[in-house]
C-alpha cells in the first residue's frame, strides 16, 4: 500500500496489519519473527518526513569513519572535528583555472596521492576535463540550495553529493575526507526513503518505527521525563552556541577576501575549510636518499632511495589505492615539495631519524635501503619533477608509471654530527644510532 508523501499522517490499514499477523500465525512459540525485507514498493508504509531510520544510518556511518580515523597514523596529533565545506566559493575566488575550466587538466597528476585510476583519467579528452570542472561548480555552488526546496529536492541533493564523493574516492586517495563529507548528506533522506535498507517483520526496527509514526499520527505524546528535558535543554544550548560561533564564519564566507582553513575562536567547533582552491600545475617530489660512503662529495658515492608507503618515488611503482586510510607523512611530503626545507623543519628532523635507523620513523616508510645494515653516514633530499607516463608510450612499455627529471638539491647531504647543534637549538632529542 503506497501512502501519499506530504499528506496527513495515517496509521497502517487494519487489513495490512491482519495480513502481517496471519503471516506469523503458524510460527511456533519462541521462534524468532520473520525479518525478511519488504517486497518492492512496500517501503512506503513508512511515512515521509520522519528521521528515525536516518539517525541509525548516520550513527553507523559515523562509527565507520571513526574506526578508520582511529587506525590512521598520528591519530593523537589531529583533532577529530567536523567541518561543513563550501569549497565552491574558494575555487571561484581562487585559482584562475577554476574560472577558465582548465583545473582538471592538472588535478589528477598533481593531487596529494594519486591512485591508478587517476593515471588514466589524466589522459581524458580536453572536453571531459571541462565537463568535470563545470560539474564541480554545479555540485558545490548550486546543488546545496536544493536542501531548501522540499523533500524530493533535498533527497536529490543528498544523492548527488554522495555520488560526487564516490567519484572523488574512485579518482584519488583523499583519505577519509570524502567518506566524512558523505555523512551529513545522509540526513537528506527520511524514513520513507531509507526504509528498504532495513528488515521488516514484527519486532524489527522498521516495525517499531512504524508504531512510533502511528502514535504520532494519533496525537499521542510520550511523557517528558527529567532526563529528556535536560537533554533537550543541552541540545538547544549547543545549537545556540554553534549559531553564535558561526556568525564570523558566515561573514567570512560572504566576504570577497574569503579566508579558508582557519578557526575564529579557541574552541574550534566551527571552522572554515576549503580544498583545492589553488591547483598546482606541475608535480614535484622530495626524494630522500642515503649513502654509506664516508665522503658524500665523492662522485662514486652510491645514493640509495628511501621509499614511502604511497607517495610517488620509484617511477616503476604503481600508484597506491588506500582510501579511506590516511598516510599523513606522505601528505606532508607533498606539501614540502612545493616549499623549502626552511618552511618544513620537520623534514630535517626526519633525516636525523633516518641517520640513526630509528625504528619508529622507519615504520612510516615502505622501503629502508639500509635494513639489516649499518645506518647511512649521510642523508640528502633531492628535488624531482614528476609526470605521468603516457599509456602505451615508451616509458609505459618499460613498466614506468612516472617520468621524472631532477630539478636540483632540496637539502644538502647531512650527517648526524652536522645536525647536533641543529637539534639542540630546537630542543629536539638527539637521535642515537641503533
Image: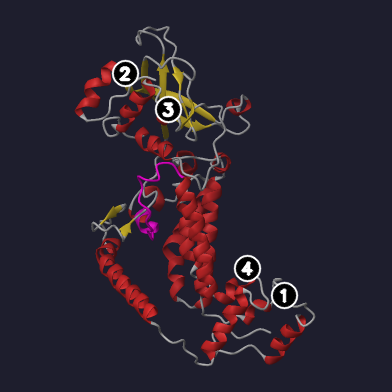
Instruction: Between residue 232 and residue 147, name the one nearer to us.
Output: 232
Considering only vertical position in the picture, is 1 above or below 278? below
Residue sitting at the far front: 29
Position of the C terminus by quadrant: top left
Q: Is residue 179 left or right of residue 250?
A: right
Neighbour tally class for label 1: few under 14, some 14-19, many 20 plus, Cα within 10 Å: few
Label 1 belongs to which residue?
Answer: 30
Q: Earlier in the sequence, mark 4 or mark 2?
A: 4
Position of the N terminus by quadrant: bottom right
Alpha carbon of mark 4 to alpha carbon of mark 2: how far? 59 Å
Instruction: Between residue 20 and residue 165, name the one nearer to us.
Output: 20
Q: Is residue 75 magenta?
A: yes
Please report contact status of discs 4 and 3: CB closer than 8 Å, yes or no. no
- Can residue 133 be seen in the rendering of this structure? no
Disc 3 element? helix
Which image quarter: residue 9? Answer: bottom right
Q: Position of residue 355 (x, y in %)?
A: 37, 20
Characterize the magenta stretch by its predominant secondary structure: loop
Q: Position of residue 243 (x, y in %)?
A: 29, 70
Disc 4 element? helix
- Can residue 252 be seen in the rendering of this structure? yes
Alpha carbon of mark 3 to alpha carbon of mark 1: how far? 57 Å
Residue 414 - label:
2
Q: Earlier in the sequence, mark 3 or mark 1?
A: 1
Q: Earlier in the sequence, mark 2 or mark 3?
A: 3
Q: Give the extent of the magenta segment.
A: 72-91
Alpha carbon of mark 2 to alpha carbon of mark 3: how far? 19 Å
Alpha carbon of mark 4 to alpha carbon of mark 3: how far? 46 Å
Considering only vertical position in the picture, is 414 above or below 10? above
Residue 359 - label:
3
Residue 197 - label:
4
Amino acid at each position: 500500500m503506497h501512502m501519499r508523501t506530504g499528506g496527513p499522517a495515517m496509521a497502517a490499514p487494519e487489513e495490512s496489519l491482519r495480513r502481517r499477523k496471519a503471516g506469523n500465525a503458524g510460527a511456533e512459540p519462541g521462534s524468532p519473527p520473520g525479518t525478511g525485507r519488504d517486497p518492492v514498493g512496500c517501503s512506503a508504509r513508512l511515512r515521509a518526513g520522519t528521521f528515525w531510520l536516518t539517525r541509525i544510518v548516520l550513527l553507523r556511518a559515523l562509527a565507520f569513519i571513526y574506526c578508520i580515523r582511529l587506525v590512521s597514523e598520528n591519530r593523537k596529533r589531529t583533532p577529530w572535528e567536523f567541518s561543513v565545506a563550501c569549497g565552491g566559493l574558494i575555487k571561484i575566488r581562487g585559482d584562475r583555472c577554476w574560472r577558465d575550466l582548465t583545473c582538471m587538466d592538472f588535478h589528477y597528476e598533481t593531487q596529494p596521492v594519486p591512485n591508478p585510476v587517476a593515471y588514466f583519467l589524466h589522459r581524458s579528452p580536453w572536453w571531459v576535463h571541462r565537463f568535470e570542472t563545470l560539474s564541480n561548480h554545479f555540485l558545490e555552488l548550486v546543488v546545496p540550495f536544493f536542501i531548501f526546496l522540499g523533500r524530493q529536492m533535498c533527497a536529490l541533493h543528498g544523492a548527488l553529493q554522495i555520488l560526487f564523493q564516490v567519484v572523488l574516492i574512485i579518482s584519488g586517495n583523499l583519505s577519509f575526507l570524502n567518506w566524512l563529507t558523505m555523512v551529513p548528506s545522509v540526513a537528506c533522506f527520511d524514513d520513507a526513503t531509507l526504509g528498504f535498507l532495513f528488515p521488516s517483520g514484527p519486532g524489527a526496527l522498521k516495525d517499531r518505527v512504524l508504531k512510533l509514526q502511528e502514535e504520532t499520527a494519533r496525537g499521542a505524546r510520550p511523557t517528558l521525563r527529567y532526563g529528556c528535558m535536560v537533554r533537550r535543554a543541552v541540545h538547544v544550548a549547543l545549537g545556540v552556541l554553534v549559531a553564535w560561533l558561526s556568525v564570523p564564519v558566515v561573514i567570512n564566507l560572504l566576504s570577497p577576501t574569503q579566508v579558508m582553513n582557519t578557526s575564529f575562536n579557541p574552541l574550534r567547533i566551527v571552522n572554515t575549510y576549503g580544498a583545492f582552491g589553488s591547483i598546482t600545475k606541475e608535480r614535484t617530489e622530495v626524494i630522500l636518499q642515503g649513502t654509506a660512503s664516508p665522503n658524500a662529495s665523492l662522485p662514486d658515492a652510491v645514493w640509495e632511495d628511501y621509499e614511502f608507503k604511497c607517495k610517488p618515488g620509484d617511477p616503476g611503482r604503481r600508484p597506491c589505492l588506500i582510501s579511506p586510510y590516511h598516510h599523513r607523512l606522505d601528505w606532508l611530503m607533498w606539501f614540502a615539495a612545493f616549499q623549502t626545507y626552511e618552511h618544513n623543519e620537520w623534514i630535517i628532523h626526519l633525516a636525523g631519524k633516518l641517520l640513526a635507523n630509528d625504528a619508529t620513523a622507519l615504520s612510516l616508510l615502505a622501503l629502508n635501503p639500509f635494513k639489516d645494515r649499518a645506518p647511512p653516514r649521510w642523508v640528502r633530499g633531492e628535488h624531482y619533477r614528476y609526470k605521468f607516463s603516457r599509456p602505451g608510450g615508451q616509458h609505459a612499455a618499460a613498466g614506468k608509471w612516472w617520468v621524472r627529471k631532477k630539478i636540483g638539491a632540496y637539502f644538502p647531504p647531512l650527517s648526524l654530527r652536522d645536525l647536533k647543534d641543529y637539534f639542540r637549538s630546537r630542543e629536539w632529542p638527539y637521535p642515537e644510532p641503533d
